[in-house]
């Protein structure tokens, strides 16, 4: 048993990282389009961007890109330049793709509940692709991790507080059935991430 050879860690190349970021953001942005078509939303920074897009002239992509700008300084301090640059690219691509998808795809008959749940499934898979290549979509998650390091505030508690605020604010924007579907979709998204993104589960 002691002679079992452990597999060596093979890091991703820059080309693999670049392709993964494009594929991951394509999936996340397509899920966003499904939620937008259904009039639904999700939690965290994306949820805030949805709310802004529903009550202002700003599109989701523009709101999402602008909201993330203040968090890059924290990302550099906590995660380093490589992570920050990947995250900046990922956020920019999601913002861009949410503008491009409607030029090629339009849903004329889409069940809101199905769209919300399946959209979150697609987003969850896209997040996993990004996480596996050491990128993210920034925002509240970076702030939560920084506050946890600096002041001992649990990141999960802040994330939950933000999501609760998004849900409460959405009561004035979306109908109750869509809100319930959005909550269910957010739970599915977080379950996908929890099941597939654990430290030590994968070699790379």
Image (cartoon, rainbow, N blue to C red):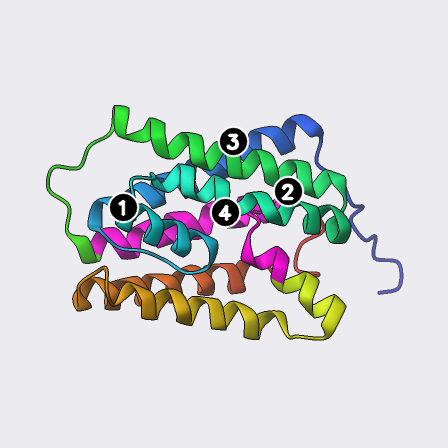
Label 3 sits on residue: 22
- The crowding category of the residue bearing disc 2, from other C-alpha atoms within 10 Å (few below 14, some 14 to 19, many at least 20), is many
Seen at 11% across and 37% down, the residue is 108
Check the image and report above or below for 50 versus 57.
Answer: below
Q: Earlier in the sequence, mark 4 or mark 1?
A: 1
Nearer the N terminus, badge 3 or badge 4? 3
Is label 4 in contact with label 2 (beta carbons under 8 Å)?
no
Q: What is the number of the mark on residue 36?
A: 1
* N-term mark: 4 or 2: 4
Q: Secondary structure at mark 2?
A: loop
Front-most of residues 13 and 50? 50
* Disc 3 + disc 2, Cβ < 8 Å: no
Mark seen at residue 8: none
CA gap, disc 4 and disc 1? 18 Å
Tag 1–tag 2 contact (CB < 8 Å): no
Q: Position of residue 12 (x, y in %)?
A: 70, 36
Of badges 4 and 2, nearer the viewer stands 4
Horizontal arrangement in the rendering, residue 28 relative to residue 105 (left or right): right
Residue beneath label 4, please? 67
Q: Quadrant of residue 117?
A: bottom left
């Amino acid at each position: 048993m002691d002679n079992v050879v452990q597999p060596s860690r093979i890091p991703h190349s820059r080309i693999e990282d670049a392709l993964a970021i494009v594929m991951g953001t394509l999936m996340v942005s397509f899920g966003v389009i499904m939620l937008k078509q259904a009039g639904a939303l999700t939690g965290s920074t994306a949820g805030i961007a949805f709310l802004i897009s529903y009550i202002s002239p700003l599109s989701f992509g523009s709101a999402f890109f602008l909201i993330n700008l203040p968090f890059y300084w924290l990302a550099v301090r906590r995660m380093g330049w490589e992570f920050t640059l990947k995250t900046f690219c990922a956020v920019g691509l999601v913002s861009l793709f949410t503008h491009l998808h409607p030029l090629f795809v339009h849903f004329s008959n889409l069940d809101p509940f199905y769209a919300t749940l399946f959209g979150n499934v697609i987003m969850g898979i896209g997040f996993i692709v990004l996480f596996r290549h050491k990128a993210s979509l920034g925002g509240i998650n970076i702030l939560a991790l920084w506050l946890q390091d600096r002041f001992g505030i649990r990141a999960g508690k802040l994330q939950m507080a933000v999501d609760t605020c998004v849900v409460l604010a959405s009561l004035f924007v979306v109908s109750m059935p869509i809100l319930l579907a959005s909550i269910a979709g957010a739970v599915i998204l977080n379950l996908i991430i929890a099941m597939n993104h654990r430290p030590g589960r994968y070699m790379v």
